[in-house]
Image: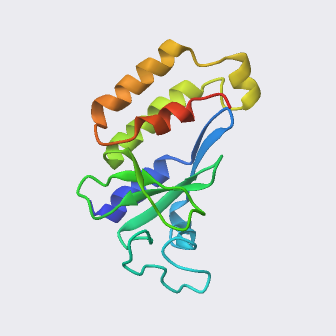
Amino acid sequence: MTILEKIRKFLQDNSEISIGYNEITFFAVDELDEEQVGYSVDDNNNSLITGQEGDWKEEWLVIGVDGLIEDPIFVDTSSKQLQVLTAAHGEGEWEPIPIADTLDSFAYIIIELKKNSVNRSTPVDLEENPISDNEKKQFLARIKKNNSYSDIDYWENFLEAD
């Protein structure tokens, strides 16, 4: 299976996940190219990749967005493991933060998030059925186990009610 096939398979299996106000929306496979606008290309399909520090890198492929803050979720296609990252948009330069060591571990994180989102997908649901400290600790421990190079704080913040 090629890298692109693996990414497409992931996208076919996932559309979105939400807990309270926090949400990750994944792109449809057939819209993947057009969703790169503003990252690797501009509105006229001109490359935004310059090779300069802080600019978008050719090997990064956006697969979704963090819905609350609209930051991209992207895969580093140059890594064998297909590391998954995010970065703040609108900062003048891209400073990637690893959120999963591999695409496979990212898929596992999404499965775990879906379990935690049951009866908690909206802010009202989450307020009525908050995630317990024990549930958070267990979730984060499972994530840390397979993601030693990733920023666990991202996931801790994702579970927050506000």
**Residue 21 image point, x, y percent:** 69, 37
Q: Nearer the viewer, residue 150 or 24?
A: 150
Q: Going by the picture, which residue comes out furthest to the right? A: 124
* Residue 6 position by quadrant: bottom left
User: Residue placed at 52% from the left, 86% from the top?
Assistant: 46
User: Residue placed at 40% from the left, 54% from the top?
Assistant: 9
Asked if 126 appears above or below 152 in the picture, the reply is above
Q: How many marks?
A: 0
Q: Which quadrant of the rendered structure holds the C terminus?
A: top right
User: Residue placed at 36% from the left, 26% from the top?
Assistant: 142
Residue 85 located left or right of residue 91: left
**Residue 108 image point, x, y percent:** 39, 36
**Residue 139 image point, x, y percent:** 44, 24
Q: Nearer the viewer, residue 29 or 45?
A: 45
Colour pattern:
rainbow
Q: Which quadrant of the rendered structure holds the N terminus?
A: bottom left
Asked if 79 appears above or below 149 in the picture, the reply is below
**Residue 62 image point, x, y percent:** 48, 62
User: Residue placed at 50% from the left, 62% from the top?
Assistant: 29
* Residue 61 position by quadrant: bottom left
Asked if 41 appears above or below 24 in the picture, the reply is below
Q: Going by the picture, which residue comes out furthest to the left? A: 80
